[in-house]
Image (cartoon, coloured by chain):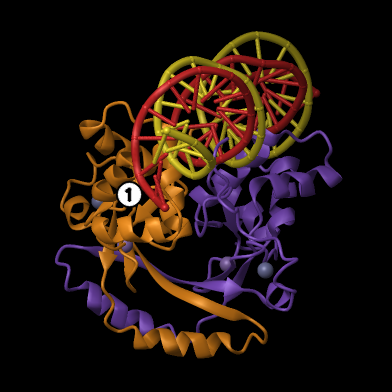
Chain colours: A purple, B orange, C yellow, D red
Amino acid sequence: MRSPEALVERFREDGLKVTPQRQAVFSALHGDLTHPTAEIIWDRVRLQMPTVSRRTVYQVLNDLVSLGEVLVVAVDNGPTRFDPNVSLHDHFVCSICASVIDVDSDERSNVASHQTTLSDFPGFEVESVEVVFRGKCSSCASLPPASSKQHDTNTRQK
Amino acid sequence: MRSPEALVERFREDGLKVTPQRQAVFSALHGDLTHPTAEIIWDRVRLQMPTVSRRTVYQVLNDLVSLGEVLVVAVDNGPTRFDPNVSLHDHFVCSICASVIDVDSDERSNVASHQTTLSDFPGFEVESVEVVFRGKCSSCASLPPASSKQHDTNTRQK
DNA sequence: ATCTAGTCAACATCCCGTGTTGATTAGATT
DNA sequence: AATCTAATCAACACGGGATGTTGACTAGAT
Ligand SMILES: [Mn+2]
Ligand SMILES: [Mn+2]
Ligand SMILES: [Zn+2]
Ligand SMILES: [Zn+2]
């Protein structure tokens, strides 16, 4: 995602009005590395603009995704996470606390070999490649295993 | 996922009863390469066992995941997909039809280099690495672009 | 034969995201 | 400054997906 100022430009060029709500979402997302959910962004925006509606924040986020300024991160089946970092990078997902952390893979050259692997599948058009690492983040790895918030213990009905 | 027969063994060893419903889910998943959703499995089971409840199928799938016999595939924000193929492999996700296709990456040696990259993050424990390819599958790539079922065009309220 | 895990129906509940409607506000443009 | 119209708002409803609940009943495992 570009700077809030650049986004103002972009929106005007695309015939979209530059409203305070939209600008508030811009600055709420700017520089965020935590891959927040829509609800988190809503909470953040309301600190400065208490009357903003949930619906509007969802809408602006979708606008940003449509414009390619923000990416959707699909690494678990929780609520949608948004990523203002549109540069090539990968993600680490903590299996304990579900946090998503950027991994800057300088070794993107590996991707090329993967793409050639895929060329074995004739007719496929690969548009992006992402590596997803899973495990325990540094915080969760250093916790006593007993007290950590574990996965659901798959309780049975009744 | 192992064979239905082996799963019968496994369930007994773990003190879980081998019911017809569970066996029906076993065979419904066996050899499936399409990464079906729970609802799809339910439909499939009901062909042979029309009275099976939705709840039970969901439950058996969760059992299989808990036992590590089936993996959950989290590549988009649709319903949860299940994967009986627990061997090391990657996935291609079609951005048009949302199908998920196995990619057998012999070049898993690349993963090692990725893990050393992550070792720059002290204290992290990497447990798995997956590569997600996105693009158009062969079927969708050969369709006339106009008639293909596109992504939502982000309709605005009112 | 007994014990108890599983299953069933038929609900309800929760979460996330979107649709609706009509009134109101406020950018963009002239 | 006046106009046009996109955008926002409140206050809803709705849908899909998954899980929780209850009590009655079924049927594995020993
Ligand atoms: Mn990221
Ligand atoms: Mn697979
Ligand atoms: Zn963690
Ligand atoms: Zn396709």
A39 with respect to B131 (left or right)? right
**Disc 1 packing (10 Å; few <14; some 14–19; many ≥20):** some
B12 with respect to B156 (left or right)? left
The correct choice, above or below, for B111 with respect to A76 in the image is below
Q: Amino acid at mark 1?
A: Ala
Of A120 and A66, nearer the camera is A120
The correct choice, above or below, for A93 with respect to A39 in the image is below
- Residue A16: image x %, image y %? 58, 41
Is residue B76 at least partly visible in the picture? Answer: no
C13 with respect to A45 (left or right)? left
- Residue B53: image x %, image y %? 39, 30
Of A128 and A25, nearer the camera is A128
Of B7 and A62, nearer the camera is B7
> In which quadrant is the C terminus of chain A drawn?
top right
> In which quadrant is the N terminus of chain A drawn?
bottom right
Residue that label 1 marks? B98
User: Which residue sits at x=28%, y=62%?
Assistant: B6
Of B55 and D28, nearer the camera is D28
Number of numbered discs visible in the structure rendering: 1
- Residue C26: image x %, image y %? 76, 32
Q: Output the chain of dot 1.
A: B
User: Which residue sits at x=47%, y=75%?
Assistant: B128
Label 1, ligand 4: CB separation under 8 Å: yes
